[in-house]
Amino acid sequence: MPELEIEHQPRARLALGAALTSGPSHAYLFRGPRGAGKREAARAFAAEILATGAADPDDARRRAMLDPSPHPDLVWIAPRGAQHLVEEVRERVIRAASYRPFEGERRVFVIEDAEAMRDESQNALLKTLEEPPVFAHLILLSAEPAALLETIASRCQPIDFAPLPAKAVEGSLAGEGSPDDVAAAARLSAGDLDRARFLLSDSGRALRTAALELDREWRKVLDLAEAVGQEAEDAARKALEAETEAGVKRSAREMAEEAKRVGRRRRTEVLDLGLELNAAWFRDLGAVASGAEDVVFNLDRIEELRSRAAGADPAAFRRAVELVEDTRRRLDLNVSEELALEALSFRLQQTCPLLSA
């Protein structure tokens, strides 16, 4: 069985190795959290597929592994904004999949953030998935597979990626902060390397500090989410303007709407992360109060945790975690963010009054 260089994902490595031995399927869905290695695995898998039947397998594999890749039979697309361009999916994947390979026996098409395809693109892709040319292989990468149409997901062979172990994230971040900061970011990242890097940034550090005081400083969390969302919107607008200058046709209205979608999405992600960080803080307080310091996430704040948890009832902290998670669910239902956070602040002060003293 071929051995793919896929770190920290033994199940995915075995499944893809078996696929190469028996002959790869026409379509795969790599699903799992962001930062779990789906992109790297897809590149390694695509390289092996393209090496099969190539005149020079080693050279085909080498070129496919480059990023960006010069291999003519590897097509890789990723959304530059909040969504994939319908025209790009149609031209570079759906139509191109009907052309025979330029070099070897196979062609590979990789779509990053597949959930960002509009329904129009997904429906158009369906025929390619139902009646694929024998030489074409599609690999969809998704951190939110539930956002894909069921007709798309059901026609792909799923390959599951687990969150990265904290030690693996910590190793990847070595040198990007103090050892204590890196260790804390790794544990708080939930196996997402991109999230861990954000937590080590200035915005991430500010969000984390505000999140730990959410019972009193809830508005700071909201303001920080707004600021990060605005930064994302501005960056997306600049990228879209550059694409327009390069010949991509978009109206000013389309660019504005697309940039706003990017900003809103990022704002929502950061606000949810703030609540998740707050829940982790209360979880850590409960762990310290119960004498279980070895499972603490916020390792760089262990002294503060000890001070705040001293003499407290662990059950109160567990109740606080429940309140935060309930608020996260409410925000998913589009309730008023300000009202939800203000109500959460009040309830946390009632549940853990010593923290607000």
Image (cartoon, grey):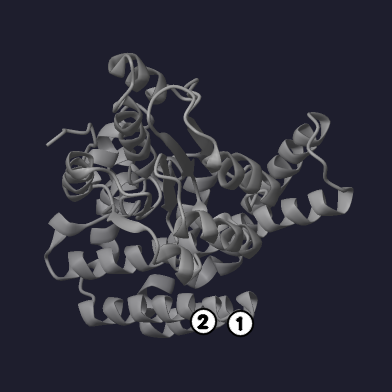
> 10 Å neighbourhood of mark 1: few (<14), some, or many (≥20)?
few
Q: Eyeballing the image, is 146 above or below 325? A: above
**Secondary structure state at the residue bearing disc 1:** loop
Residue behind mark 2: 330
The amino acid marked with disc number 1 is Val
Q: Looking at the image, which residue sits at the far right? A: 252
Q: Eyeballing the image, is 151 above or below 191? A: below
Give the mark, 1 or 2, whose residue is nearer the N terminus.
2
Total number of numbered discs in the rendering? 2
- Rounded to the nearest whole Å, what is the CA distance between mark 1 and mark 2? 6 Å
> 10 Å neighbourhood of mark 2: few (<14), some, or many (≥20)?
some
The amino acid marked with disc number 2 is Arg
Seen at 46% across and 60% down, the residue is: 130
**In the depicted view, which residue is nearer to us: 308 or 276?**
276
**Secondary structure state at the residue bearing disc 2:** helix
Question: Does 309 sit left or right of 292 as displayed?
Answer: right
Q: Eyeballing the image, is 71 above or below 120? A: above
Seen at 37% across and 84% down, the residue is: 351
Residue behind mark 1: 335
Residue 128: horizontal and vertical position, in percent?
A: 51, 54
**In the depicted view, which residue is nearer to us: 73 or 209?**
73
Are the residues tagged 1 and 2 within 8 Å (C-beta)?
yes
Residue 315: horizontal and vertical position, in percent?
A: 23, 82
